[in-house]
Amino acid sequence: MTAPWGVLSDERRVTLHQLLAGAATNRAFSSLAEAREECGIAPSRLIRLDEASQSPPPAATLGHSGGVLGALRQMSPAAHLPSRARILIAGVMADQPDWEGIALLPDGAAGGDGITHWVHVSAREIVSFQGAATGRIAAALGARLDAAIDEAALNDTLSRPERLAAQIYAADLSGAEAALAGHLLGAELASMRPYWLGQSVRIVGPDAAYGAALRQQGVMTDATPLAQAWAAGLAALGAAAGLTG
């Protein structure tokens, strides 16, 4: 029987993540010290997610060292990819480890901080990535990206992103929340065109807004439920660390 292993994160609270019978579970602790003392897992079989430990791309999807899986930090364009996102990306690639394309993590998938991550994956490495603060802007304007999206507004801004400020003002003045969301999403797609044009895109979580918008542009997309991607990513991390067999 394989000895237990787990992943420790301390983003908002200290949490132990484990796979039990193929399902992801979590258990909260008051501190890292308490987690290590009370979790019942040998220290050598714990992997810690550490946002302060940062490496530049390109980097192996689940490259880790000394029991730590860190974040990735890109200088140009400036971008930060959380360690949690690396696990989710490994999860959406679990069925095809050599898949190449764009992993798309909408706001909420990698931490709920209002940032959407577009990540280029090739040869089992994270090659480059870029973040968009669309979720933060939408929240500030009272719009929701997980609700109805005005397709005409999206297409208008996608084709003329330089008019975004005026389009937002007009939509806000008329109280058109769906148009606000459409304009913002259109602006994001315009800025991220190099990340989706001619690419295969895998979305983590519900793909209602991004999936529909990308498919309208002729992009091949598929979506993996967040819980499924997380469980598969944990399994991949355990295997990469030599903890599962």
Image (spheres, rainbow, N blue to C red):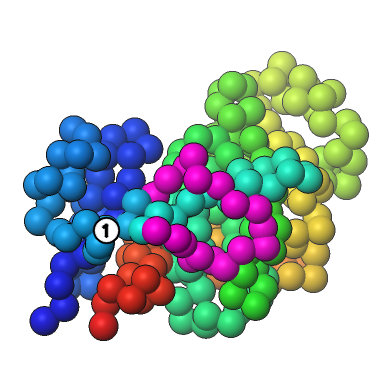
Query: Does the segment drawn in magenta span residue 111?
Result: no
Q: Which residues are magenta?
A: 49-66
Picture coordinates of residue 184 (x, y %)?
Answer: 70, 36
Q: Quadrant of the N terminus?
A: bottom left
- The residue lying toward the viewer, choosing from 45 and 185, is 45
Q: Is residue 192 visible?
A: yes
Q: Residue at x 64, y 28 (%)?
A: 137
Left or right of 4, for residue 58 = right
In this rendering, the answer to whether 153 lies above or below 71 is above
Left or right of 225 in this view: 106: right
SS label for mark 1? strand
Relative to residue 53, is residue 207 depicted above or below?
below
Q: According to the image, label 1 marks what residue?
A: 46
Q: What is the total number of numbered labels drawn onto the structure image?
A: 1
User: Residue drawn 22% across and 57% down?
Assistant: 43
Q: Nearer the viewer, residue 170 or 161?
A: 161
Kind of residue at badge 1: Leu
**Within the image, what quadrant is residue 244 found in?**
bottom left
Horizontal side of residue 59 vs 18, given as left or right = right
Which residue is more in the foreground, 234 or 168?
A: 234
Instruction: In the rendered view, tell whether residue 162 sits above or below residue 98.
Output: above
Side of 197 where 63 appears, left or right: left
Residue drawn 75% across the image and 59% down it: 195
Point out residue 143 in the picture as x, y percentages from the top left corner. 58, 29
